[in-house]
Amino acid sequence: MKKSRFFSFVVSVLLGMVLVIPAFAGSKKKAAPPPVHQPPVISSVTANSVTVTEDKVSSTLAITAFTEINVNGRRATITDLKPGMTVSITLGAGANLASRINATGK
């Protein structure tokens, strides 16, 4: 009689473990990788404009004599801007007018 109670107890504990342990296993679904943000990059430069590409969208911005241009932290001119440089642009009065360009790279 004692053996049958002990056997019933062991079976109950094992059955309980089999039912409870999968709840603590967690999800087997892989987490999606975080989105990769690409900084704006100069794609082309002309005498009075610069085209910048960010997240596969290109924008052409006008450059005037009053546009402040810095390359690698130093004062520069439009001829110092090269395709492939990473850029940060402050817009001027118009939506397509650059008032300040800070470029880094080559």
Image: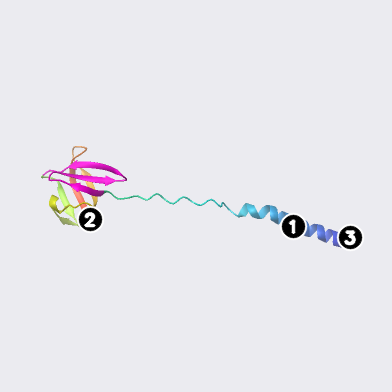
Q: Which residue is mark 1?
A: 13
Q: Residues within 10 Å of mark 1 (few under 14, many from 20)?
A: few
Q: What secondary structure is marked by label 2?
A: strand
Q: Earlier in the sequence, mark 3 or mark 1?
A: 3
Evaluate whether residue 77 shows in this view: no
The three-letter code of the residue at mark 1 reads: Val
Q: Residue at x 69, y 55 (%)?
A: 18
Q: For the residue carrying disc 3, how many other residues have a C-alpha within 10 Å: few (<14), some (14-19), or many (20+)?
A: few
Residue topped by disc 3: 1
Say which element carries label 3. Answer: loop
| Amino acid type of the residue tagged 2 in the rendering | Thr
Task: Name which residue lies at 26% across and 46% down.
Answer: 53
Pointer 2: what residue?
104
Q: Residue 52 got which mark? A: none
Mark 2 vs mark 3, CA separation in Å: 84 Å
For the residue carrying disc 2, how many other residues have a C-alpha within 10 Å: few (<14), some (14-19), or many (20+)? some
Apparent side of residue 96 relative to residue 54 in the rendered image (left or right) = left
Which label's residue is closer to the chain start, 2 or 1?
1
Q: CA distance from mark 2 to mark 1?
A: 66 Å
Residue at position x 77%, y 57% in the image: 11
Q: Residues at badges 2 and 1 in contact (C-beta under 8 Å)?
A: no
Please name the amino acid that badge 3 sits on.
Met
Distance CA(mark 3)–CA(mark 1): 19 Å
Q: Where are the magenta residues, as a range?
A: 41-64
